[in-house]
Image (tube, helix red, strand yellow):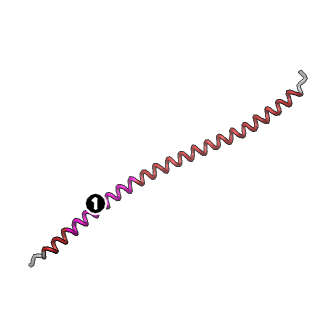
Amino acid sequence: MRTPPESFLIFREELEKARLEKERLKKEYEIKLADMNRELARLKEQIQSQQELIKTTLDYAIRLEENLGSFKAEVTNGHHLKNRSFH
């Protein structure tokens, strides 16, 4: 059996190095992708919390505005009732 030429052995060694580098890069990519997905999930959760806070704040502001309108009406009606008093 003949021994393969030296260039073939070098090529095979370089091919193995390339395969190992590809595996290393693949693992590194998967780790970075997993980290980014975790960060994205965290950011989505923060955005949802902020949206809920904004919604609650707007609901509260709307209720205050409605209450202020009712209060103004009561003050106006109370003022008219006061003028009609016999005392």
Q: In which quarter of the image is the C terminus?
A: top right
- Residue most extreme to the right: 86
- Residue most extreme to the top: 87
Give the residue drawn at x 38%, y 57%.
33
Residue 37, percent from left and from top? 42, 54
- The stretch of residues the image draws in magenta is 14-35
Residue 44, percent from left and from top? 49, 51
Q: In this view, does 74 lie above or below 28?
A: above
Residue 19, percent from left and from top? 25, 66
Q: Is 18 left, or right, of 68 in this rendering?
A: left
**Mark 1, secondary structure of its residue:** helix
Q: Is 4 left, or right, of 80 in this rendering?
A: left
Q: Is residue 20 magenta?
A: yes
Q: Is the magenta stretch mostly helix, strand or loop?
A: helix
Quadrant hosting residue 11: bottom left
Q: Quadrant of the N terminus?
A: bottom left
Give the residue drawn at x 75%, y 34%.
71
Quadrant hosting residue 15: bottom left
Residue topped by disc 1: 24
Residue 48, percent from left and from top? 53, 48
Name which residue type carries label 1: Arg
Q: Is residue 1 above or below residue 45?
A: below
